[in-house]
């Protein structure tokens, strides 16, 4: 898939990206098609090396940016270009999940619109990449017994080797409920592999987080 997004939706002029220290975070669709999460402008610029490495930079308001060089030929984030195109972003994420399912292990249900898609993308990347932000606790229900864990890695360790994953439900700190699925790397090495978490769609009429696990 061409990772260069189509011309962004016209949204009028927007503010320039913050110079840092204001809590602005970003998602980057890299030239490889992979997705990365950055907690700040400084973190993003320190990690990337050339202009074409980030064909699409997205903020939480779905505005897109690209890298450019300043007068000293240092990388900087350019002005906002408009809103990211919904269908392109959804397909880019689906492609990344297919190529690297081990890096996109929280499989949210399809988002109905751009705002939900972008919000979910930020949430899942934060949780998968284990940022140092205090996002809250994970909840698990295992054979009717409830417990809490502080990070996705802790959930993985608790479920490692569990042969009855169909009886397990996992809730992330944002209130989304999942069923865990084991993916063996080799059919003869059952212990080698990784877990993905497939969202269980909320029942009609139920508010997000309504299917609360027991504390």
Image (cartoon, rainbow, N blue to C red):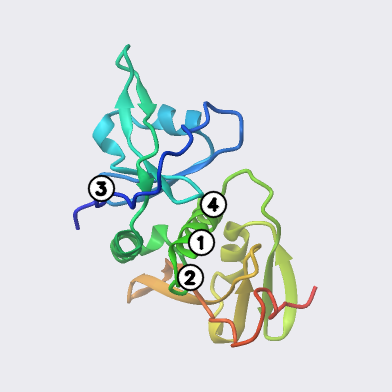
**In the picture provided, is 56 more to the left or to the right than 201?**
left
Residue behind mark 4: 126
Location of residue 28 by image quarter: top left
Q: Quadrant of the N terminus?
A: bottom left
Q: Residue at x 74, y 81 (%)?
A: 145
Q: Kindly give the residue lying farthest to the left in the view shown.
A: 2
Q: In the figure, 75 relative to 7: above or below?
A: above
Q: Are marks 4 and 3 in contact (CB under 8 Å)?
A: no
The image's mark for residue 48 is none
Label 1 and label 2: CA atoms lie apart by 8 Å
Label 4 and label 2: CA atoms lie apart by 14 Å
Residue behind mark 1: 120
Closer-to-camera residue (132/75): 75
Q: Are marks 2 and 3 in contact (CB under 8 Å)?
A: no
Residue 53 in percent (x, y) is at 28, 37
Closer-to-camera residue (19/120): 19
Label 2 and label 3: CA atoms lie apart by 22 Å
The image's mark for residue 108 is 2
Crowd around label 3: few <14 · some 14–19 · many ≥20 (10 Å) = few
Location of residue 74 by image quarter: top left
Mark positioned earlier in the residue sequence (2 or 3): 3
**In the picture provided, is 4 more to the left or to the right than 106?**
left
Mark positioned earlier in the residue sequence (4 or 3): 3
**In the picture provided, is 78 more to the left or to the right than 214?**
left
Residue behind mark 3: 32
Q: Kindly give the residue lying farthest to the front in the view shown.
A: 12
Q: Residue at x 64, y 86 (%)?
A: 205
């Amino acid at each position: 898939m061409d990772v260069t997004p189509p011309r962004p939706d016209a949204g009028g002029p927007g503010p320039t990206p913050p110079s840092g220290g204001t809590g602005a975070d970003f998602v980057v669709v890299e030239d490889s098609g992979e997705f990365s999460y950055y907690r700040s402008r400084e973190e993003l610029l320190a990690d990337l090396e050339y202009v074409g490495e980030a064909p699409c930079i997205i903020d939480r308001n779905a505005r897109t940016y690209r890298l450019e060089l300043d007068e000293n030929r240092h990388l900087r984030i350019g002005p906002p270009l408009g809103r990211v195109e919904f269908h392109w972003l959804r397909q880019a994420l689906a492609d990344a999940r297919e190529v690297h399912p081990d890096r996109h292990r929280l499989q949210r249900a399809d988002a109905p619109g751009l705002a939900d898609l972008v919000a979910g993308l930020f949430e899942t990347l934060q949780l998968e990449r284990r940022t140092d932000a205090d996002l809250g606790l994970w909840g698990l229900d295992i054979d009717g017994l409830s417990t809490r864990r502080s990070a996705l890695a802790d959930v993985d360790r608790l479920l490692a080797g569990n042969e009855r994953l169909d009886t397990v439900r996992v809730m992330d700190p944002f209130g989304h409920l999942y069923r865990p699925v084991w993916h063996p790397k080799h059919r003869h090495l059952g212990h080698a592999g990784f877990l993905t978490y497939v969202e269980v769609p909320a029942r009609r009429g139920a508010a997000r987080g309504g299917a609360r696990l027991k504390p």
